[in-house]
Structures are given as C-alpha cells and as structure tokens.
Image: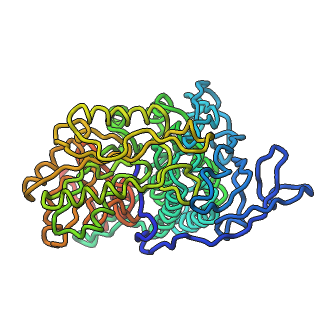
Amino acid sequence: DARPRSLPGCHQAGRRLPWPPTSGREVLLKQSPQGSLASATSLGGASRPRRLTGSIPPMLAQSRLPSLLLQLPRLRSVAPGLATMSSATGTLTVQQPLNYRAGARVQPADGGQLEEVFEPATGRVLCKLPCSGEKEVDLAVQSAKAAFKIWSQMSGMERCRVMLEAARIIREQREEIATMETINNGKSIFEARVDIDISWQCLEYYAGLAGSLAGEHIQLPGGSFGYTRREPLGVCVGIGAWNYPFQIACWKSGPALACGNAMVFKPSPFTPISVVRLAEIFTEAGVPKGLFNVVQGGAATGQLLCQHPDVAKISFTGSVPTGMKIMEMAAKGIKPVTLELGGKSPLIIFSDADLENAVKGALMANFLTQGEVCCNGTRVFVERKILDTFTKEVVKRTQKIKIGDPLLEDTRMGALINRPHLNRVQGFIKQAKEQGAEVLCGGDLYVPDDPKLKNGYYMRPCVLGNCKDDMTCVKEEIFGPVMAILPFDTEEEVLERANATKFGLAGGVFTRDIQKAHRVVAALKAGMCFINNYNVSPVELPFGGYKSSGFGRENGRAAIEYYSQLKTVCVEMGDVESVF
C-alpha cells in the first residue's frame, strides 16, 4: 500500500502539471501477426500501418512500445456519455516472461507454483504467473551483485546521466505504461498517468542528488584529520505493493541506484506487469546488466529474498503483519529495513476551515485509487458546528463520482484489485452497520452497463455516519473507498482521539487559523502531515510513518541515509604515541 501523489492542479516536484497533459495526436502503429500492436519502427515487413487516434503524448510516436505486447485494438479518446467501455479494456495479452535478470526477460529457473493475475475491470485472467524459487532468487541476487561491482565504481555524475536517461524514456512512454498500470491495477487512467509522472520525477530528483553525495572533512589536533565516505550498501531488495506498482518501484530504485546500489525487486503477484517495463527501461538507459532485476512470486519468494545472505538491505511496502515478519527475517541477518506499512489516519476539519477546500480534501483523502491507499485520512473528524453542512456536501459529491471502466477518460473510480479484497471491504461495511454506523451513501456493489465489465470488482464509494471511536470501521484499516465521519467539540479532545491508534502514517488538518494548524500537526503522532490539503506529496519531501506504520523514509534527501552507510577514516600526520 503506497502513497498517492498529487492529482492534476497540485504541485509536483516543484511544478504544476498541466491537465490534460497533451492534445489528441495520431500515432502510426503496425499490426503484428498475433494481432498485437508494436511500433512501426520495430516491426519489419510491409504490413499496412494502422492509424490510431487518441490523447497520446507526442513523444510516444518516437518511442519503442514495450516487449510486453499490448493487444489494444483501438486507443481513442471517449467523450463523456458516448461510451461505457474503452475498446482497450479486456484486450491485454501477456506474451513474454515477467521475470527480468541480467538485462533480459527470463522464465524463472525454478519454482513452479502458478498465481492467476486478473484484470480488475473485467475479472478476466491476464496470465498465470510462475513464482520464483530458491534457484531463481539466487541467480537474480548474483546477477545484481556482479552489476553492483561496476555501478558502485562509477562516479555520481555518471550514475546521474544514466538515471536521467531512464526518466526521459519513462516520460516518452508515459501513456503506454499508464495503460498497463490501469489494466493490471484497476485505477483510472487519469490517476495512472499522474503515477507515471511522479515516477520519472523521482528518478530525475535522485539523479540530481547522485552527483552531490559526499562525506565530510574533520580537522584534528597536530595537523591530523578525519573524513567520512558515504558508500553504497550492496544488493538491496525492494518488495512492492499492488496499489502503486510502477511508482513504488521507482521510489525504491531511485535512491538505491543514486547511492550506487543494485536492486532485486519483487512486485505484488497481483500486479506483476509494469515493473518489468521499468527494468527494461533501466537497461535501455545504460545501467550494467543485472543492476535492476525482477523476481515474481508471493510470500515464499519474498522470504527467500529476505533470507539471502548476499542481500544487504530490504525495503518493504505493504501490510503491518507482513512487515513484522520481514523485520524478524532481517534481524537474523542483521540487515537494515525500511518499512512503509498501513495506516488509519485522522483528518481534522475545524469549523473555521474553508468548507469547499475541506470537502475536496476529504474526498482526496479517501477515494483515490478506490480507497486502496495506506495513508488515507479515513477517520474524518468534523467540528460539531459544521457537521451537518459538511456531511451533506461530502455525500452529495461522493454520489457524483463517476465509476466504471478505468480506461475511459471521464472515469474517476475504477475497480478494486480483486474479488477477495472487494468482499473484505464489503464485510467491513456490513459490520459497521451491525455496530450502529449509518451508511449515508454507497457501500453497495456496482455493476456497469457494459456486459464485458459485469465480472469486474466495482463498488460505490461509501460514507459512514454515526460512527464511534470503538467501532471496527474506525479502528481497522479497510483499504477501500469507505469514509467514516466523527464529530468533535474541542481541539484537545480531537487530538487525543486522533492519536488513539496503533498507526501513525499520516494526518491532516483544515483550518484558517495558522497557529492552530501548526499546533495540531505538531501534536499529531504521524510521519506525514498535511495542512489545508491531503494526499499531496512531492518527491522532494520525505515520506514514512510512526508507530506500527513503519520506520525509515522514502523520498527526499532523507532516503539517502537509508540506502548508504558511512565509513570513517582517521589520518595521523605525526608519530604514533603508544602507551606500551
């Protein structure tokens, strides 16, 4: 479960992104013999080019489509109300291996267990994923270890140039990567494009830092001196979550590679597709083959990675129980870990807040990526004076959220990740009603009109009223589009209630009183706090949690500390003084 990033109109990496990002543009593609699409420049023969129109960035016309072929019969912009399903939905075909080792896609050397990978929008099986076993994990680690010897000896500026090239390629292939992400994850293409933008911005940011990494000089008596060297750790393991597959991989690989490390990355078995494209992009950009490898699999594969003796560090994004297990395994090898875990974050709305902004903030805090976001502000504390007005407006706007095919331009809520998770979220809502909460809107299953989408994992976003602090829906992370509204009367009271949780990932406050705002965030026991906004986090700012939400930081300069180690060197310029 990873962080959402700013939607259009919000600042990202020090700039405001335009939306829509590009105008409609024609792209010439050829039809492959298998019916899949490949770039006109990458296919031989004299087959007739097919003209596809759509809102595709200009640079895509010059880019190579990934070796993971997309069978997309027709990409096009769809005006609101003119269609209920994109013609690209339900057409992805996975034709090549999803493991990546030593600069190439490979079938795992061992393992054997197959995991079904679904398209959330349709419920269709995209492929059966072979999980990597002990031999494949070792091959991936050894390949990364060999590449590390080359990469770690390159200067920071040399690494910078390669990472900038990777960022450039991601920008060029933004639309195709976002489409892959949407098909495999279920989030709207609107959001997926922003995820990809944040991804290349992350690599650009750490490319800029790579050339500036340095130690310090310390003068000692008698002309002697000491200095420190900031050195890489070695082979790092990244374990990602399914809500932001490509972005999480960039968040972990960016600082790791900038510091001179290699990485073996394991995505969630629910979303294995897009990260392999990142591996190809790194190779295309010029990293040593093997520097960024991908192994696929579930818990057993993750355990093999964590226990491998040549792994120097583990960075994990996911649930609290899994984070605890990773800590236990890492402890046996005395390996440093970064854990970005779950949350049940408070969003506090004071009566003096700008109501329009507060309502927008509450929606942003709860319904991005179908609510499947670890730092969501799902406990919305509203000062009693404005409770009715605020609640009425939130319900009205929640009911207007467009649900449906995530590849349609006007969709704002796609499908949840899979059927078991959808059932789990439904179970939380059922339990909330049994415990006395009132469903003010949504919470039921949603079936789109198009029959091809009838087996997708859709539900209407839910707002719960009459909530109490001891209800399960208020205490436990639901990880779905469910907002709980709770009234409060005083600042002291709401702070005590907001902090009464085992989690500490995020928190937010809306108020016009700037002193109150800073006072409240200072008192919140959370690692990422927002004032008069929510779920915006430029890559320049560190992100991470308190308490059971984990430790260590991703993004910002702070992440460098977690992917490097300091060596101290003491230099004697005189004679040795010995007591012997």
Q: Nearer the viewer, residue 153 or 52?
A: 52
> Percent position (x, y) of residue 325?
35, 32
Q: Is residue 307 left or right of residue 534?
A: right
Q: Residue at x 13, y 57 (%)?
A: 384
Which quadrant would residue 314 be assigned to in this image? top left
- Which quadrant does the N terminus fall into? top left
Of all residues shown, which one is farthest toward the right?
46
Total label count?
0
List x then y, in percent, for residue 373: 38, 49
Q: Is residue 452 left or right of residue 398?
A: right
**Horizontally, is 59 left or right of 31 in the view?**
left
Is residue 86 or residue 71 the one in the foreground?
86
Give the residue at the far top of this rendering. Answer: 112
Q: Residue at x 17, y 56 (%)?
A: 524
Left or right: 70 as drawn, with respect to 14? right
- Is residue 176 visible from the viewing direction of this image? yes
Towards the viewer: 333 or 96: 96
What colouring style does the render use?
rainbow
| Residue 338 can be seen, yes or no | no
Q: Which is nearer the eye, 155 or 22? A: 22
Residue 123: percent from left, percent from top = 57, 36
Residue beneath the point at 61% across and 36% down: 124
Image spot of residue 462 (x, y percent): 35, 46
Question: What residue is at 69 percent from the left and 53 percent from the top?
Answer: 66
